């Protein structure tokens, strides 16, 4: 899909801006009926071909890998990710000489939900980021403890392995805050996000520390400067090295990453208004320090 296309993504999970004016809109849906990743399907197809060629039954492979035959079938069909255990067991049973085991490096689970993956790619190469949050600390400013609390509290619940992968991936993203050449970051945070019971003293101190970086501005929108547009929801604006601008917004069960100039302009106007009425970076640092003293 071209960079300039509009990407509208809806799925069963939460969390995760882009563009060009003259391109037609394209919608991509990620849900339970979305096709599996191509590498899953290709690896599953090869798994079945090798098993059939070697006259190994599905039941035999299932027993060797300690899975049910139905699970092996779903992997061969690309519905499930072929696991390293299955690939290694099949490689040995089918005498594939490492050709099936080699697929393990290509079927690893993505650390981010499907709908967030494009956003993460653009975030990684952005030269400027404007980020506004209503109820949460922005992901790039989260401590490990805060991130773990949020991710492990998802419902339906996530497996421990997935939780660890996502916490590690979120922390790894934060390297963009200090990379060279520096990225210009502006974070706008509504006071409600700081008042959450999930935000401990360590998280507040981390905000104060991050606010001292020369390429990073943190501004707080306090309750007494409330404007209604601030409650519409979180949003991010990204600018790429080619000076393309992307807008990203999220909701409870959907998110949108788009280069549509109309949407980008609307996000820019909202962010500019919020920034105008918010506390200055210096006032914001003092505001957060007062909250630290209250804890």
Image: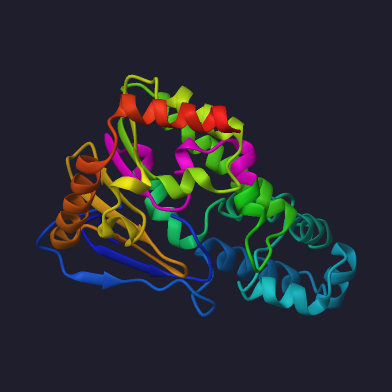
Quarter assignment of residue 184: top left
Residue 133 sits inside the magenta stretch: yes
Q: Residue furthest left?
A: 22
Name the residue at 35% across, 59% down.
Answer: 233
Q: Between residues 37 and 133, which one lies in front from this camera angle?
A: 133
Residue 29 seen anywhere in this rendered image of the structure:
yes
Residue 239 seen anywhere in this rendered image of the structure:
no
Q: Which residues are magenta?
A: 123-148
Q: Is residue 232 above or below residue 77?
A: above
Instruction: Indicate the position of residue 211 as horizontal and vertical percent values.
Output: 40, 25
Name the residue at 21% across, 57% down.
Answer: 259
Is 91 situated left or right of 174 in this image?
A: right
Q: Quadrant of the N terminus?
A: bottom left
Q: Quadrant of the C terminus?
A: top right
Name the residue at 34% across, 59% down.
Answer: 231
Quarter assignment of residue 65: bottom right
Instruction: Indicate the position of residue 134 as horizontal and vertical percent values.
Output: 40, 53
Q: Between residues 233 and 65, which one lies in front from this camera angle?
A: 233
Name the residue at 21% across, 53% down.
Answer: 270
């Amino acid at each position: 899909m071209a960079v300039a296309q509009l990407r509208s993504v809806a799925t069963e999970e939460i969390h995760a801006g882009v563009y060009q004016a003259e391109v037609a809109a394209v919608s991509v849906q990620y849900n339970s009926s979305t096709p599996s990743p191509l590498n899953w399907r290709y690896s599953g197809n090869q798994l079945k071909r090798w098993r059939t060629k070697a006259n190994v039954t599905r039941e035999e492979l299932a027993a060797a890998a300690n899975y049910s035959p139905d699970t092996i079938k779903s992997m061969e069909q690309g519905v499930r990710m072929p696991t390293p255990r299955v690939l290694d067991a099949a490689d040995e049973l089918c005498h594939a000489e490492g050709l099936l085991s080699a697929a393990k490096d290509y079927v690893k689970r993505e650390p981010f939900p499907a709908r967030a993956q494009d956003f993460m790619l653009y975030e990684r190469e952005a030269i400027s980021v404007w980020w506004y949050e209503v109820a949460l600390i922005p992901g790039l400013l989260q401590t490990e403890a805060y991130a773990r609390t949020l991710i492990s509290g998802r419902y339906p619940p996530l497996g421990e392995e997935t939780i660890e992968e996502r916490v590690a991936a979120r922390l790894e993203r934060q390297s963009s805050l200090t990379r060279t050449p520096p990225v210009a970051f502006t974070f706008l945070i509504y006071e409600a996000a700081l008042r959450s019971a999930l935000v401990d003293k360590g998280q507040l101190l981390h905000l104060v520390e991050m606010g001292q970086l020369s390429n990073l501005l943190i501004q707080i929108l306090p309750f007494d400067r409330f404007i209604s547009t601030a409650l519409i929801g979180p949003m991010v604006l990204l600018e790429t090295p080619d000076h393309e601008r992307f807008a990203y917004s999220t909701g409870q069960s959907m998110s949108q990453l788009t280069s549509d100039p109309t949407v980008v302009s609307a996000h820019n106007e909202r962010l500019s208004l919020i920034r105008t009425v918010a506390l200055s970076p210096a006032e914001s640092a003092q505001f957060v320090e007062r909250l630290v003293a209250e804890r």
